[in-house]
Amino acid sequence: MSQTARVRRRRDLTPLFLLIPAGVVLLALTAWPLIQLVVTSFLEFGRAQIFGAPPVFVGLDNYADVLTDAEFWQVLGRSVAFCLVNVLLTMLLGIAIGVLMTKLGGGFKLLVSVGLLLAWAMPPVTASVVWGWIFDTDRGVVNYLLTQITGADFSGHSWLIDPLSFFFVATIIVTWQAIPFVAFTVFAGLTQVPNEVLEAAEIDGATGWQRFRLIVLPYLRGVLVILLILQIIWDMRVFSQIYALQTVGGIAAETNTIGVYIFKVSIGAGDLGAGGAISVLLVILMLALSGYYIRSLLKQEES
Amino acid sequence: MRRELTPTQPRSRPVRVLLNVIAVVVFVASAFPVYWMINSAFLPNSAIREQTPHFFPDQFTVDNFVKVVTQPSGTIEFLPALGTSLLVTLSTVVLAAVFAFFAALALSRFRFRSKKTLIVGLLVAQMIPAEAMIVSIFRVLDGWQLLNSIVGLTLVYLAVVLPFTIWTLRGFVAGIPVELEEAAMVDGCSRFGAFFRVTLPLLWPGLTATGVFAFIQAWNEFLFALVIMQKPEVRTLPVWLRAFVQATQATDWAAIMAGSTLIAVPVIVFFLLVQGRMVGGMAAGAVKG
């Protein structure tokens, strides 16, 4: 009985029908645009083409242009640097808070959980606007507190006008929102470490640090690698926060990250060919980075 | 399920006090911006503009909310944006649930040749960054006359959330014993009758988790809404907020915070309701953000 239900005959079209609605959407709005994107990246496609002129096939010219453009490398370097700093901070603080939560009593653990959930739940654009207000030049609470604490006059200090302090604020926004996910996931992972093993190690004389390094870390390794990959992917393509901060009062040209840059080249300047080439490069980079993650999900699947 | 790690818990009192102090610091750092948003939203703009900030809403007022909601200036109206956001978000949640339910059944209750390829395709699709797709999705929608249309934006959001919802629901369907469906079929149910009468009611936890995920994604999404819905009358809330900040030139912070609060509160409420499931679900599959 169970065999007939599980293994359908070869001509059974039921799964096909069940897949049609989702399949049509994904083919029309993921697969088809992706093909279009690759095609466009080989065409000269600027303002003239947007208004109807036939696009010209230019082979790898767009890629050559992009890869020899100093601004592209600046943007890429800025994105990589921003990504590394944010991923490092997010992982370190996230792991620390995850460990902290295992050592807290009920009330304090709840307090930390509620705080983390609030930060996690804020819509990114809203969060950027709120942080923009906190760091506001004239009436921001940060400038007020800095003036009170240091005695120096910080009123009128603009945080978003200088690229370095712009990215300092952006880093606070991004890590503030990303840490909760890491902390909760690490905490959930830590609760899976068997107590018996830790007790045995303690009886054998292992110190706290040794128990963490030799028992807890190996248990967490898989989780940490996946968190690391996801954080790299998310921070590499950060868009909303940077774009919203630029709106609140930042300088644009020197603070573009790769996501914002694609937007500005394609939509702002209307060069869809070059924008397409950068986009294809970003897709390849992201898929290369997520290869391990996808493989590990498939492996989980089989076991 | 979650056991306490008794052996590693500190016994000495000073250490415990120190950890509790750190816990309070973490709470304040995490919650302060949310508090500050709500606090500023309930203060009159005159109080906001004073040299010394008001740390509590001591001059409590709801004027900012009234001002935001009844915004007179034509191009940055709140209510139409709220309507668009609600419509797009609810359509996305409902359609994603239905489509993902069907697809999850196909992928977990049937065997067919290209199944493995489809699953890999889903995971890859989930990893394609939205930033790279905006231009071609814009052009595809343009070709179909679906720019500035709720249908167009809903279709885009469906494409964004479906890989994750299908993947997650598939896990939930696999957790329901197929024998239950078989028993219903022995009792005279059709195959689809068994899906709807037996599997679907057992799938509510999964549908809730994926539904909330789709809600948050669609409600918060900024980039596609910015590019696809360029006409002022079809703006969504996040795009409205940005336009509002620009229109007030980041001066009327009380009103801006009231607007932010109205956008953030539904998401925060949903988040707190389902927080337990979000962690496991998000760890199991990537979330675009």
Image (spheres, coloured by chain):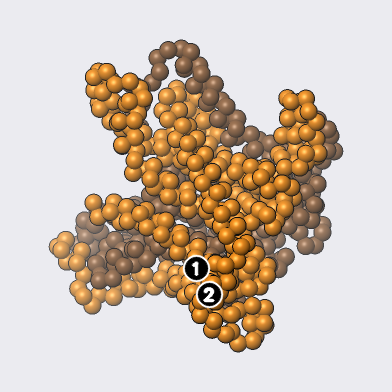
Towards the viewer: B84 or B230: B230
Q: Position of residue B241 (x, y in %)?
A: 70, 53
Query: Which residue corresponds to the image point at 68% horizontal and 48% vertical from the top-left?
Result: A163
Q: Can see residue B231?
A: yes
In terms of depth relative to the viewer, which is nearer, B46 or A300? Answer: A300
Image colour assigned to chain A: orange
Disc 1 + disc 2, Cβ < 8 Å: yes
Disc 2: which chain? A
Marks 1 and 2 share the same chain: yes
Q: Which residue is mark 1?
A: A280
Label 1 to label 2: alpha-carbon separation = 8 Å
Q: Colour of chain B?
A: brown
Quarter containing the N terminus of chain A = bottom left
Q: Secondary structure at mark 1?
A: helix
Picture coordinates of residue A252, whole percent (x, y): 70, 56
Q: Chain of mark 1?
A: A
Which residue sits furthest top? Answer: B13
**Residue at (43, 46) in percent of width and height:** A228
- The answer to whether one can see residue B205 in this image is no
Q: Residue at x 63, y 82 (%)?
A: A49
Q: Which residue is mark 2?
A: A41
Tag on residue B12? none
Nearest the viewer among A89 and A62 is A62
Q: Earlier in the sequence, mark 1 or mark 2?
A: 2
